[in-house]
Amino acid sequence: MKLIKDLITFIKYKLKEKTYSHLIFCENNNLYLYLEELIKRQKKKKVVISLEKIKKNFLGLDYFNFHTNFFRRFFF
């Protein structure tokens, strides 16, 4: 089931990939605290990629997370 969800997430990302100017990798909730200021400061179109579900609101940013190791390795 997670593999199918990750496939759908990957397809959604690929369809919009060219519209992003910045990709921010936020591995987990602990790192979000350090990246939050950077995320808010940049005015350009950004996307946040994560390896686990982030509990914070991204205020209109696109956010994708991957659960399976296959798509984590494939994406990065």
Image (spheres, rainbow, N blue to C red):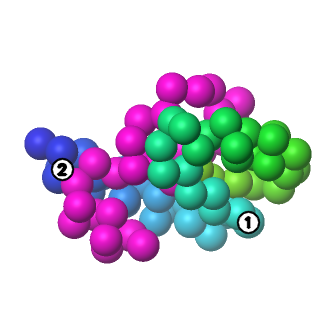
Q: Residues within 10 Å of mark 2 (few under 14, many from 20)?
A: few
Locate the N terminus by quadrant: top left
Where are the magenta residues, as a range? 49-76
Q: Is residue 74 left or right of residue 69?
A: right
Frontmost residue, 62 versus 68: 68
Q: Is residue 26 left or right of residue 44?
A: left
- Quickly name the residue at label 2: 4
Frontmost residue, 38 versus 60: 38
Residue 64 visible to an observer of this rendering: no
Name which of mark 1 and mark 2 comes first in the sequence.
2
In the image, what residue type sits under mark 1? Answer: Ser
Image coordinates for residue 72, horizontal then vertical, percent: 33, 63
Magenta-drawn stretch contains 63: yes
Q: Marks 1 and 2, Cα distance to the nearest angstrom?
A: 27 Å
Identify the residue at horizontal 56%, vertical 66% (top origin). 17
Mark 1 near mark 2, Cβ–Cβ under 8 Å?
no
Locate the C terminus by quadrant: bottom left
